[in-house]
Image (cartoon, grey):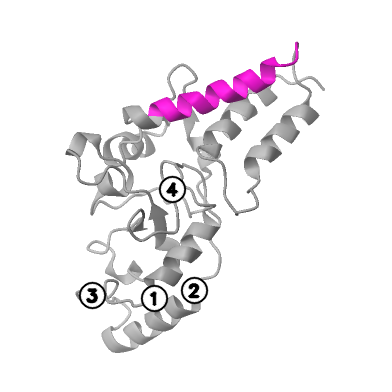
Amino acid sequence: MVNIQKNTSPQSLSQYKRESISQYGESLNAGNIFDDFRYKPELRTALAIEQGYVCAYCMSRIEDDQLETKIEHCHSQSEYPSEKLDYNNLLLCCPGNSGKRARDQYCDTKKDAISLSYNPADQSKDLKILIRYQSSDGTIYSEHSGLNTELNDVLNLNHVRLMSNRKKVIMAVDEALRKKPGLRSLGELARLMNKWKGKNQEGQYQEYYGVALYRLSKHQSYGNR
């Protein structure tokens, strides 16, 4: 999971929010306001683009496809009705093994109607500092107990499939660094980090890019000057 830089809310959502507030009040405490929003394809596209076509939670590849993604409320609609149409509260997620038994679900599917206290779109909480990955098996964790609970128990981001994929990224980073003997210079590490930070011609980040950036940042601490 990495911080997401939100863009401007789609005009259709902003207009619908104004109309809904006018009709129901600021609390938006009415039944199916979000479900009744007609322009979800436009919203889904906006979310996919700003996230670089990776899931907001696990960072696996997602597509701009209604059947293969879920528009997620980080703060649940039931607990925070006033945020139903808040663009900063909306994220795009993978299916998360929807339809499988609960212990095999992850991301929004596992989270269901629980509200998170750590929103990837909240820039005041720097996830690249708060989140860590074990190189041995790809485990994601945090020394902040609240965040660690959300990563493990609420989102189930240590599902075996996700751990395996993160481990592969860590191994790929280490293999790239081993191609040349000795420590990498800070310049070399910066170039590698920029490759992972950047989007391709289709506007996509590489899957699990946050894992690679974390691993490179650890190597950077020992880089030659």
Q: Earlier in the sequence, mark 2 or mark 3?
A: 2
| Disc 3 secondary structure class | loop
Residue located at (57% from left, 46% from top) = 205
Residue 17 placement: quadrant: bottom left
**Disc 1 to disc 4: CB gap under 8 Å:** no
The vertical placement of 72 against 196, above or below, is: below
Tell me the amino acid under the disc marked 3.
Answer: Asn
Q: Residue at x 64, y 43 (%)?
A: 197
The x, y position of residue 63, in whole percent, is: 45, 54
Q: Is residue 205 visible?
A: yes
Nearest the eye: 137 or 219: 137
CB atoms of marks 3 and 1 within 8 Å: no
- Give the main secondary structure of the magenta stretch: helix
Q: Give the labeled residue for mark 1.
A: 39
Residue pointed to by mark 3: 29
Relative horizontal placement of residue 110, taking residue 72 as reference (left or right): left
Q: Tell me the kind of residue under disc 4.
A: Cys
Q: CA distance from mark 1 to mark 4?
A: 21 Å
Image quadrant containing the C terminus: top right
Determine contact: label 2, label 1, CB under 8 Å.
Answer: yes
Mark closer to the observer (2, 1): 1
Q: Is residue 27 magenta?
A: no
Instruction: Tell me the kind of residue under disc 1.
Output: Tyr
Question: Which of the two discs, 3 and 1, sits closer to the camera?
Answer: 1
According to the picture, the residue beneath numbered tag 4 turns out to be 55
Part of the protein shown in magenta:
163-181
Callout 4: 10 Å neighbours few (<14), some, many (20+)? many
